[in-house]
Image: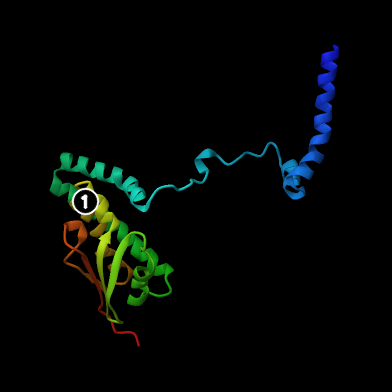
Amino acid sequence: MSKRSAVNHARRQAITTILPACALACLGGSRASAMLQSNPTQEATHRFDAELERTLTNRQFIDIRYRDVISLAKALEKNMGKENAIAFLKKVRTEEMLERGKAQASEFPDDSLDSYVDQFRTRYKNTLTMEIIQDTKKAFELKITECLWADTFRRAGAGEIGYAWICSGDYAWARAFNPRIRLVRDKTLMQGHAYCNHRYIWEGKAAT
């Protein structure tokens, strides 16, 4: 072994011996100990499963989420005809919201009107600007003056697609949660009105 090789070998041995003690002193005992005791063969989290650092605004997130939906719907209009495409979107959305309503009914404390509309009292603060007009045991009415979904679809020139894919399922959603809940609405931002007037009516016996 040459003199240079011998020196390098000695350095490697010294580093191997000293590193654990240095790590414990410099990094802190528990952290270094965990590092040293970890299984070197343990597979790290796959990059596909790594958490994303969200740097998007709510508007940007919704834009990206529905970009392909809008493109696909416009392609369907060209191939199926607008009327058939819109009918197809409404059918798919209705089926989806029926399942959602049934699932919520099984998960919520009960299937009353109050239980159903409570989600509108507490959620959607980052996507809707709304005012509660009436909140009783028999009726719950919302006036929505800003809707991020309507903003997204209408900026893309796809308000009718947006109504079919986002808004049309609201009726089935309420009905599936409880058949005694009926949605009445004749204005939506998605259709170009100044606001949405969601009114949920309880058609069963009023709770006492």
Q: What kind of element bears circle 1?
A: helix
Rendered image quadrant of residue 67: top left
Q: Which residue is mark 1?
A: 154
What residue is rendered at 28% in x and 55% in y? 149
What residue is rendered at 27% in x and 59% in y? 147
Q: Residue furthest bottom?
A: 208
Mark 1 neighbour density, 10 Å: few (under 14) some (14–19) many (20 or more): some
Rendered image quadrant of residue 146: bottom left
Q: Residue 134: x, y in percent?
A: 27, 78
Rendered image coloring scheme = rainbow
Q: Nearer the viewer, residue 69 or 97?
A: 69
Q: Is residue 187 above or below residue 24?
A: below
Q: Amino acid at mark 1?
A: Arg
What residue is rendered at 39% in x and 64% in y? 103
Q: Residue furthest front?
A: 26
What residue is rendered at 32% in x and 76% in y? 113
Q: Residue 9: x, y in percent?
A: 83, 21
Q: Quadrant of the N terminus?
A: top right
Count of marks, rendered view: 1
Q: Residue 117: x, y in percent?
A: 33, 72
Q: Is residue 36 visible?
A: yes
Q: Quadrant of the C terminus?
A: bottom left
Q: Nearer the viewer, residue 56 or 73?
A: 56
Q: Is residue 67 left or right of residue 105?
A: left
Q: Is residue 180 visible?
A: no
Q: Residue 122: x, y in percent?
A: 39, 69
Q: Is residue 80 above or below residue 207?
A: above
Q: Is residue 157 above or below residue 207?
A: above
